[in-house]
Image: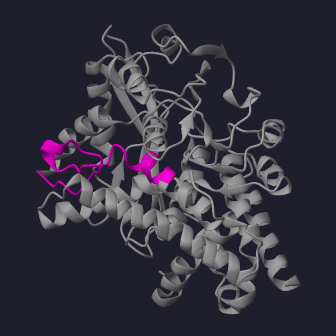
Amino acid sequence: MTNVKTYIESIKDQIDHRDPDQKEFQEAVFTVLDSLAPTLEAHPEYVKANLLAQLVEPERVIQFRVPWQSDDGQFNVNRGFRVQFNSAIGPYKGGLRLHPSVNLSVVKFLGFEQILKNSLTGLPIGGAKGGCDFDPKGKSDSEIMRFCQSFMTELQRHIGPDLDVPAGDIGVGGREIGYLFGAYKRLNGFKNGVLTGKGLTFGGSLARTEATGFGLLYYTNAMLKAQGDTLTGKKIKISGSGNVATYAIQKATELGATVITVSDSNGYIYDPKGIDYQVVKQIKEVERGRIREYADRVASAEYHGGSVWDFDVDYDVALPCATQNEINKDQAKLIVKDGAKCVCEGANMPSYPDAIAIYRDGGLLYGPGKAANAGGVAVSALEMSQNSERLAWSFETVDNRLQDIMEDIFAKSEAADKKYKLDKDYQAGANIAGFEKVAEAMMAQGLV
């Protein structure tokens, strides 16, 4: 094991030397590398082939300028990215994020996580991610359209149905995907498999909108079932109020749980009678408003400023669904104190590493984002399948496939946990299960 640990540390030193300022990327990669020691010990050929050095270096990084004109006539320039990280098991697949925080480190961290997440789905898709530091909040539809057209003018050179298939992420919903697809079509002709998350009138899939939130609850339910428990009667704290959070609330309610919080970047709602996801949908999806408006419409609800993870209340399950690094060590301690038994991540890397350590020390079950929130990319891959077949599946067909995939992801993580005697460390189990499939494919294909 000493040689394996030395090898892992050498890869971490290499990353620290090459990318010293990419803290999000380092956090994601270092957490994964530390958990891979058991499988590297069992497979010395991975060390001999220096496989980790290949895994942590993107196959391709694309950076470009995105000029666009606002409604007042001002000319603006943003910075766009696409990181095509690993194509060992299929074409690059991963979302596009529009948010001021987007930089190369964030996109690389997301792309690296996507490799293992996509592997866990069991579907033939590689890992990628992209985005831009453009902020869609407060922009008109015309401004969004002009930005998307400019962004796609460059991105279209690097993507295709069998090469790289982007989707949505934070700041990229149905409106943005529609504009991006229209711009791609004008330049390349109609290729409906080039983007996923499309509208139903031009190749989109039923259940895609609900997929990440529904999938999160299917995974969480599978984790609880493995412990002889269920979601029925559980009180759940959810952060976020976007696509993931909204449909997580819906599915949690359908499964007999009560969601007591929802939030956005300004504050959170507490409703002890249970959050009404229909009201959240109206405010966020239709009116594009702020979550504080919920308290004006629901008598039992209270609005508070600040982070929902600083709110002290008893509950059973924590589902962070907002953004990366939203839960720190002290907030993790509060989660334990409040009696939560389970944390499953609907967002990508929402918990700091020291927060995850608190979960483990407190005896909480922990489902990492790469496993728990894989429902979105899973249904994106199912959308690709429908596009290839020139068919549209029913909502029930897609939803049933999604549930099977999410339960299988937990089963793979649990199997790896048991194989390597990790004591219910489902984070390490997910990392190992995702890595081993990619590693086998990379070894079989040689140095490419």
Nearer to me, 293 or 197: 293
Question: To which quarter of the image does residue 314 belong?
Answer: top right
Residue 259 in view in this figure:
yes
Tally the numbered discs: 0
Magenta residue check for 214: yes
Question: To which quarter of the image does residue 257 belong?
Answer: top right
Quadrant containing the N terminus in the rendered view: bottom right
Q: Position of residue 396 (x, y in %)?
A: 26, 56
**Left or right of 308, for residue 208:** left
As drawn, the residue found furthest toward the front would be: 233
Which colouring convention does the figure follow? one colour
Q: Position of residue 274 (x, y in %)?
A: 53, 28
* Relative height, residue 41 to residue 139 (above, below): below
**Left or right of 13, for residue 193:** left
Q: Position of residue 341 (x, y in %)?
A: 72, 50
Q: Residue at x 68, y 36 (%)?
A: 326
Q: Residue at x 18, y 44 (%)?
A: 200
Residue 26 in view in this figure:
no
Highlighted magenta segment, given as a residue range: 190-217
Nearer to me, 418 or 431: 418
As drawn, the residue found furthest toward the right would be: 2
Nearer to me, 209 or 343: 343
Q: Residue at x 52, y 77 (%)?
A: 438
State the predominant SS element of the stretch in magenta: loop
Q: Residue at x 73, y 61 (%)?
A: 30
* Relative height, residue 104 to residue 294 (above, below): below
Nearer to me, 315 or 81: 315
Magenta residue check for 85: no
Question: To which quarter of the image does residue 371 belong?
Answer: bottom right
